[in-house]
Amino acid sequence: MIDVYFTATPNGHKVSVMLEEIGLPYQLIAMDMLRGDHLTPEYRRINPNGRLPAIVDHDPTGGGAPLPVFESGAILLYLAEKSGKLLPSDPRRRSQAQQWLMWQMASFGPMQGQAHHFIRYAPEGQTYPVERYRNETIRLLNVLDGRLTEVDYLAEEYSIADIAAWPWARAIQAIGLTLDDYPAVQHWFETISKRPAVITGTDVKNAANLSSARPVLSDEQWSNLFGNNMLAAPTK
């Protein structure tokens, strides 16, 4: 059994989709970041970075004690290697899958994450960071569209690279962008959207107070996400 410490974000959906695709048994453990579940000492022992998602594999590859794995890209690689699925065996395609996974982890996700912050949470009126990160997302969408005009999937076959990038392609609507100007991305996105594992893996939705365009947070909730509570070192 694999425990998935989960909230319904693009990174969370990477893991739930992957587990549905490969068919390994798992259970979702819902985490409330507004309440500060990600800041507890117990969770920090699973993920010292205090972010979501993370997993604990109670039947890990190689045996032994339960194995925690954090960082969504590392989780996808671990699950692909454990299951023998969705990481190409051909060396060239395998490298392509790893490259596009790193592209998503280093660029496509983080740039959107910054845009999300300045559009949804930061004090209003900060036009420079909004434009900066939205424009960078547009640049990255052009990179993605260019790749997908050449191939059906990022590594030429459906893989963890597509699972990593797909939820972030869906998330662009939250920063006022659409896929209309990226026909190759739109075709790829719609094709993947029809997969049963993707439908099931994304069925869990965000809590109402995190799904609005500009959620209203209490001081404590803000602190848990961005302020002193988030900065504080975990107690033992």
Image (cartoon, rainbow, N blue to C red):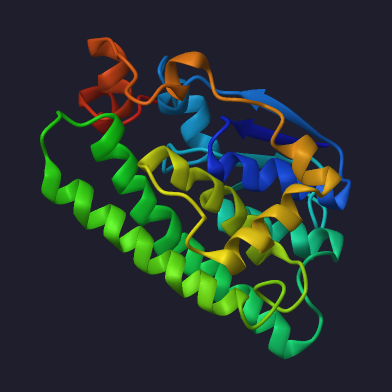
The number of callouts visible is 0
Task: Identify whether 151 is placed above or below 13.
Answer: below
Task: Identify whether 121 is placed above or below 138.
Answer: above
Depth check: give the residue in front, 16 or 187.
Answer: 187
Task: Identify whether 228 is placed above or below 68.
Answer: above
x and y, in percent, of residue 139 in the image: 36, 68
What's the residue at 44%, 54% (across, down)?
A: 109
What's the residue at 15%, 28% (across, down)?
A: 123
| Image quadrant where residue 132 sits | bottom left
Can I make out residue 71 in this image?
Answer: no
* In the displayed structure image, the side of residue 38 where residue 233 appears, left or right: left
* In the displayed structure image, the side of residue 37 where residue 150 appears, left or right: right
Task: Identify whether 44 is placed above or below 142.
Answer: above
Can I make out residue 112 in this image?
Answer: yes
x and y, in percent, of residue 136 in the image: 30, 62
| Image quadrant where residue 155 sits | bottom right
x and y, in percent, of residue 15 in the image: 67, 45
Name of the residue lying farthest toward the bottom: 92
x and y, in percent, of residue 53 in the image: 56, 39
What's the residue at 64%, 48% (across, down)?
A: 14
Depth check: give the residue in front, 138 or 197.
Answer: 138
In which quadrant is the N terminus drawn?
A: top right
In which quadrant is the C terminus drawn?
A: top left
